């Protein structure tokens, strides 16, 4: 019967709406803090700094741009988790003296592991084409692994 089906789908919609509202009451996912910036790496160029801010900075700095959907559960839980964990692993806003060879940073980009795929999906400006990616990786190497970058270059020059 059409009326029965209508009533059932209305009940399902009401249940889903109720569930959605209940999710919003979970306290996790709302601590959208941007603590002060206390230091920064010695970027090799403004271009590297800018690309990092655009493609990585939301999770690896204290200058996170919190989008509107980061306020809405359950997406807010994922965003909170990524930012907390991202900052824990690598935070350019609390960078102090140069901590030596950080070749893992360019490597994540070369391998396509970073930025996270879910982030690339939502952020068109974090998707780098091949040329932009190569330039960015070179900049990250010069910034974070200058000796490794120089070694690789002199090897190339020797050929
Ligand atoms: C959406 C959030 C997000 C973005 C954007 C992002 N990362 Fe990450 N990053 C994480 C998380 C979460 C981890 C830790 C878990 C993991 O390794 O997957 C991580 C780990 C890393 C690590 C590993 C650090 C270690 O100690 O092993 C490096 C290096 C890194 N990211 C570099 C980058 C670079 C470079 C970019 C930009 C091209 C970037 N990330 C963009 C969230 C992000």
Image (cartoon, grey):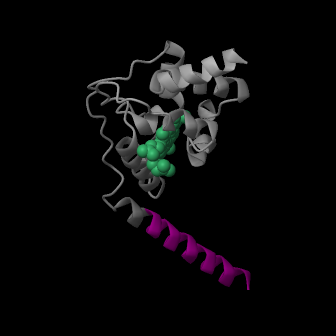
Dominant secondary structure of the residues highlighted in magenta in the image: helix
- Compared across the picture, whether 9 is left or right of 15 comes to right
Any magenta on residue 2? yes
Determine if residue 112 is in view. Answer: yes
Residue at point 26% right, 25% down? 38
On the rendered image, what quadrant is the C terminus found in? top right
Circle count: 0
Check the image and report above or below for 12 versus 43.
below
Any magenta on residue 145? no
- Nearest the viewer among 2 and 113 is 113
Residue at point 68% right, 81% down? 5
Residue at point 41% right, 63% down? 23
Q: Position of residue 43 (x, y in %)?
A: 44, 18
- Nearest the viewer among 18 and 117 is 117
- Nearest the viewer among 69 and 92 is 92
Q: Position of residue 27 (x, y in %)?
A: 30, 58
Residue at point 30% right, 31% down? 94
Q: Position of residue 132 (x, y in %)?
A: 66, 24
- Compared across the picture, whether 95 is left or right of 131 comes to left
Q: Position of residue 142 (x, y in %)?
A: 51, 20
- Nearest the viewer among 75 and 17 is 75
On the rendered image, what quadrant is the N terminus found in? bottom right
Determine if residue 69 is in view. Answer: no
Magenta-highlighted residues: 1-20
Check the image and report above or below for 150 versus 126.
above
């Amino acid at each position: 019967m059409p009326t029965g089906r209508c009533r059932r789908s209305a009940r399902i919609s009401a249940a889903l709406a109720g569930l959605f509202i209940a999710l919003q009451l979970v306290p996790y996912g709302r601590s959208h803090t941007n603590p002060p910036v206390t230091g920064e790496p010695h970027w090799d160029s403004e271009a590297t700094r800018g690309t990092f801010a655009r493609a990585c900075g939301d999770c690896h700095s204290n200058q996170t741009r919190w989008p509107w959907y980061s306020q809405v559960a359950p997406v807010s839980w994922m965003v909170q988790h990524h930012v907390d964990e991202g900052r824990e692993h690598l935070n350019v806003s609390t960078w102090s003296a140069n901590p030596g060879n950080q070749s893992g940073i360019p490597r994540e980009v070369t391998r396509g592991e970073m930025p996270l795929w879910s982030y690339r999906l939502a952020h068109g400006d974090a998707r780098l084409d091949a040329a932009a990616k190569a330039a960015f990786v070179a900049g990250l190497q010069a910034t974070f692994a200058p000796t490794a970058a120089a070694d690789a270059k002199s090897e190339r020059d020797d050929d």
